[in-house]
Amino acid sequence: LQAAAERFVQARDMMMKVRSGRIPQFGLGFDVSRNRQSEHRLFRGEGEATEETSITLSGLASWEPDFWSAIRNATRAEIYRAQERAAEWGLARLSLQAELARDYFTLRGFDAQIAVLSTSITLYKHSLALVQTQFAGGLASNLDVARVESLLFNTEAQLANVQGQRQVTEQAIAILVNQAPANFSIEPMTDIELKIARFALPQTLPSTLLERRPDIAAMERRMAQANREIGIARAAFFPDVAFRLAGGFEDEGINLTKLANSLWSVGSLVSLPIFQGGFRRAQLQQAWSVYREMEDRYRSVVLNAFREVENALSLTNRLNVSVAHKEAAVKAFLKTQNLTAELFQGGLASSLELIFAQVSTLEARMQLVELQAELLRSSVALVRALGGGWNQEQIPKEEEIQPFGTLQYVNLDKPTPAGGIDVPAENNWQFNDLTAPPSKE
């Protein structure tokens, strides 16, 4: 996410670099030199000095008028590129949030499975104790004891496997929140069932979807850049015009600023390539091709966005129905298990019937937890497909793209925040000396 923010900053600075071409350029120069010529130089006059001192103070101004809007189009293209980077930052943040939520619900699903397995293990231990008592009294066979033991040990192995998966998921969450896995932990949940917030799902696609997806906004800005590139390619067919003004003073001593020692130069340059072997025509044709490519890619991104929303809606609706049916099935299995246990204690049911009821109940409860976790993950996918609360208003306006003032020469360490995107650039200078020993703080 920080890398995406830095790419946005770089795009803003690139816009400033390109836009500077529209502004007159000024410079100053100061030159001091001492020269000695050979006494036997050809055409040297008699008595002419062989050594001389030259002091020059000069100024230079140049300006390239943007008659054909080449710089203007390039500046607009860089503004659109910066807005594209801002949308990509929103997409990166949305993706990280969705991944974090998905991993968190997966973790809570493992917690619920651990709670179900732990409850079943407690029940199986009670059943094993009961069967062992009956075996001691001659009311049960050794086979009955072995059946319950195999069920208990198999469930304990399943519990260890789920606990390992939970630990792996917890470590993945630690990385997402920028924490060391060794120092990160999430308190386990002891509820057997996941708590699912029920909310009304839209039955049709929202008309504002195109405004709520950062990937669509990024591609639209990229298409706008391609459009400006066409204008830049067209400007190459027209002549380049530049004006140049230079002036100053030159003398051998301290009387530098006397009017007699002044010098100046005024000039203009007009250049127009006549023949370049088709270079400019190819450049224009390429710009049009890139624009058409961006149009097609934009259409593809939009269609993919609608597909993702449709898939998430369909899956979430189906999982809601599946969870409701599985909840009813779990209630029936629990009732069957309790009745079978009562019959077994009364000697009216065999251990095989009890084990079958317990295994069926455990499987149903585990399937319910898995469906609930999948429903939560599907809800996350739906929220992500709908943009997760992002909208085009979060893209910085054109006037916000400029990172600093044209005449600003202080407080340049950190660019002005824009679009809610900020970077920790307050301490840039501490990284200048790469050979300095690391700080002990």
Image: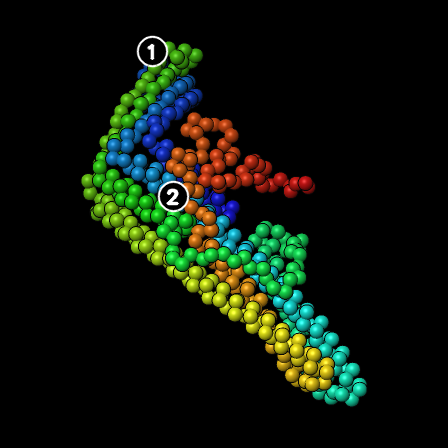
Q: Secondary structure at mark 2?
A: helix
Task: Give the quarter of the image for residue 262.
Answer: top left
Residue type for callout 2: Arg
- Image x and y of residue 301, in percent: 36, 55
Amino acid tagged 1: Ala
Colour mode of the rendering: rainbow
- Total marks drawn? 2
Residue 265, placed above or below residue 15 = above
Label of residue 81 in the image: 2
Residue 334 higher or lower than 45, as above or below: below
Question: Mark 1 sits on what residue?
Answer: 260
Residue at left offset 37%, top offset 32%: 20
Upstream in sequence: badge 1 or badge 2: 2
Is 91 on the left or on the right of 330, as rendered?
Answer: left
User: 10 Å neighbourhood of mark 2: few (<14), some, or many (≥20)?
Assistant: many
State how far apart marks 1 and 2 are (Cα): 52 Å
Q: Left of 336 or right of it: where is 127?
A: right
